[in-house]
Image (spheres, helix red, strand yellow):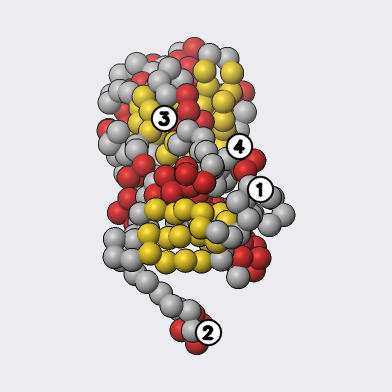
Amino acid sequence: RLALEKSGVELRCSSPVRELLRSGKGYQISTDDEKLYADCVIMACGGAAGEKLGGVSDGYELMKPLGHKRTKLYPCLVQLICEGDYPKALKGVRADGMVKLMLGDDILAESRGEIQFTETGISGPAAFDISRAASTIGEGATIYMDFLQDYSCAALEVLLLKRRENHGSLEASELFTGMLHNRLGRMIVKYCGFSATAPLSALSDEDILKACRISKAFPLRLKGTEGFANAQVTAGGLKTTGFNPETLESWFMPGLFACGEVLDVDGDCGGYNLQWAWASGNLAGRLGK
């Protein structure tokens, strides 16, 4: 901001642009109070995600009269909504794991990282990374979570059989104690249909194998995702085919540039979307000045 002031750049806050039109070799920019004229315009108003933080759809609408079309928009890096009472019962629990989104036998997306259970489903980086696929598929898919991804099912089975042998008097609810968050471990035991108060010694070999399989593929039916208001990023945007990838200038409107989230570019968690905003803004700004 100080650098802008030092360079003599004029800032106009709270002056939303209502219309952008071609005017001679430049552009006419209309606000509620005035009309401005510019040789070059950079569309850098972001996407529709995070309305409370400034997310808008203005960029897509302003570019329509100039011939630029957009793809369908989806909320991305957003919480997933799942069926059943299990997410609600585990609200606030965090776990490290592998998450897979599947439709039948097809893996649509997968990610590894922190999973956070919410009242309506799951959140956290691992969930965010598969949210793009979840937004586009809608209902019908299933999420499988592996909470012990560093162990094969066979290795885990050996560990649990030893636990049953060495601590048979413990209640079945303690099967995963020390391995998983207590509430998560007990939920897996409940999901398997075991009596929480029965001794571990009462679990059969088949029961132990079932517990292994569930802990490595805990299923939740996907209902959808939270909307744009809770999303961190918009998937979709202005079609990139309308812009020169080396300059981000419109192919058919000289002097018109677009950068950042308004374009159909989005990435996983980890700062990739921020990096794209900075890098593309730098490129458009250097060429559009």
Mark carried by residue 7: 2
Query: Label 2 near label 4: C-beta < 8 Å?
Result: no
| Earlier sequence position, callout 3 versus callout 2 | 2
The amino acid type of the residue labelled 2 equals Ser
Q: Which residue is mark 3?
A: 175
Q: Which residue is mark 4?
A: 150
Left or right of residue 196, residue 242 in this image = right
- In three-dimensional space, the C-alpha distance between marks 3 and 4, rounded to whole angstroms, equals 18 Å
| Nearer-the-camera pick, 216 or 281 | 281
The C terminus - image quarter: bottom right
Above or below, 13 relative to 96:
below
The amino acid type of the residue labelled 3 equals Leu
Mark carried by residue 251: 1
Q: Position of residue 97 (x, y in %)?
A: 51, 38
| Earlier sequence position, callout 1 versus callout 4 | 4
Label 1: few (<14), some (14–19) or many (≥20) C-alpha neighbours in 10 Å: some
The amino acid type of the residue labelled 4 equals Asp
At a point 47% along the width and 66% down the height, the residue shown is 37
- In three-dimensional space, the C-alpha distance between marks 3 and 2, rounded to whole angstroms, equals 66 Å
Above or below, 108 relative to 65:
above
Element class at badge 2? loop
The amino acid type of the residue labelled 1 equals Trp
| Nearer-the-camera pick, 92 or 27 | 27
Q: Nearer the viewer, mark 1 or mark 3?
A: 1
- Residue 140 visible in the picture: yes
Q: Nearer the viewer, mark 4 or mark 2?
A: 2
Q: Position of residue 216 (x, y in %)?
A: 52, 27
At a point 56% along the width and 37% down the height, the residue shown is 111
- In three-dimensional space, the C-alpha distance between marks 1 and 4, rounded to whole angstroms, equals 49 Å
Q: Which quadrant holds residue 167?
A: top left
Q: Position of residue 185 (x, y in %)?
A: 39, 33
| Earlier sequence position, callout 1 versus callout 3 | 3
